[in-house]
Image (cartoon, grey):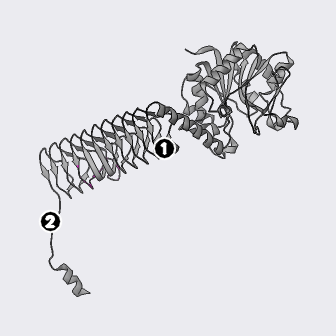
Amino acid sequence: MGNDDLTTIILAAGKGTRMKSDLVKVLHPLLGVPMVGYPIDLSLNGINSGKTIVVVGYQGEKIRAHFPDNRLIFVDQGDPLGTGHAVLCTEDHLKGFKGTVLILCADVPLLKRDTVGKFIDAHKSNGSTITVMTAILEYPAGYGRIVRMDGGLVGRIVEERDVSPPEMAIKEVNAGIYCIDSPFLFEALGRVRTDNAQGEYYLTDIAAIANEQGERVYGFAVEDPTEVMGINTRVDLAKADEILRNELLTQMMLDGVTIVDPKTTYIDKTVRVGRDTVIYPNCYLQGETTIGERCVLEPNSQITDSKISSDVVIRASSVIAESTINEGASIGPFARLRPGTVVKRNARIGNFVEVKKSIIGEGSKANHLTYLGDTTVGRDVNVGAGTITCNYDGKKKHPTVIEDDVFVGSNVELVAPVTVKKGSTIGAGSTITKDIPEGALAISRSKQKTIRGWKHRKARKK
């Protein structure tokens, strides 16, 4: 159940020109999740806000497409006329609402749930109409300054471009995060003007308006200023990614995962890893990936959107995407599993083997230099080195079926569509174009011809 006394507005309308990107800033990923996803998750699942409104502008349709959750309300700002105007665009969705409005920034992704919880509690208990989240920074350049009054309440919030020389020395800055009583918010926004350096409607101006009307404006200073770090450039993005990654890997290690070198291990926020799994350096675990217990992930492996069961070994330099690997299987080294691959219990995929949209049955093995595409392999099948399934005729893909207990010799070509029945054997070097009956031996190779004295003939020609 949501908190019906709380509405969250997330400001996500800016283009983010300092990112120097064709992609809107708030969709740049952090640990595999667009940065706007962090405040969205915080609102929906962290503080259980009764209503979550996302204000979008530039590439708003892309943002909507990334977050199809029907709990979200998207509002298009239209012309980018400032933060005050962005909040004002949400008014129709808050008519009659008498509770607290929490305003978050889409480009401030490091904010923690506990901090926001304390922030909301402070607002509700301090008797203020506005509570502003602030931070003390040694080097405050780039941020608006908090101007305190006698008694410690906030008198004004001054945007950086409008800061006077004496105010430049102020080290307490505005984090851009607010709790505001809803009735006052929209009344005050109606009085905001554009007489500032940017010619915009500043949300920050409502602090001075509140004081003019005798309302209290409280400043809530965060303990860790890192939490309110804004992302404006790709340098900021890399710093935030490192902070989040360290937090994630630390928690995984505390939960029983061995990460040999956290500095060179890259795991998305959406990944789940079971206890007693060992992850070696330079591994990349991405997307909706789950790793079971007691697995071993050797160096330089990349796993994306895949389900790995327990007791699986992924040997060095393997690449796995959109695949399922069952208990006890072994993959690699230097293997590639493409989308749609299922490797069943105790099966083995060895070095320089590529598998695509195929099922590899329990206990079966393809140990070297093999391609299996659009193939169903039964139980206890041996696929020899250099074997390929010729699944593509230039226009269509065709299936290959290899039933249980089949032995495929080395350097075999299986020209699909073809079925190899249970218990049959294929001799090395064969090209198979027809179905093979159960228990049969199939050999397709030219007769060997030996020419004696060949070396001497060549010498005489020279």
84 relative to 310 in the view: left or right: right
Residue type at numbered disc 1: Asp
Image quarter where the N terminus lies is: top right
Residue sitting at x 36%, y 35%: 294
Q: Is residue 296 left or right of residue 420?
A: right
Q: Is residue 71 visible?
A: no
Quadrant location of residue 155?
top right
Judging from the image, what secondary structure is the residue with disc 1 in? Answer: loop
**Which residue is rendered at x = 78% and y = 23% of the image?**
189
Q: Amino acid at mark 2?
A: Lys
* Label 1: few (<14), some (14–19) or many (≥20) C-alpha neighbours in 10 Å: few
Residue that numbered label 1 is attached to: 261
Indicate whether residue 385 is drawn in magenta. yes
When asked about the image quadrant of residue 3, the answer is top right
Point out the image quarter for the C terminus: bottom left
Question: Mostly what secondary structure, the magenta segment?
Answer: loop
Q: Residue 248: x percent and y percent? A: 52, 34
Q: What residue is drawn where x is 62% and y is 13%?
A: 4
Indicate the secondary structure of the residue bearing disc 2.
loop
Q: Is residue 238 visible?
A: yes
Q: What span is in magenta?
A: 383-397
Q: Which mark is residue 447?
A: 2
The image position of residue 146, as x and y in percent, is 80, 29
375 to the left or right of 229: left
Residue 28 point in image, percent of width and height: 59, 40
Residue at 14% x, 65% y is 447
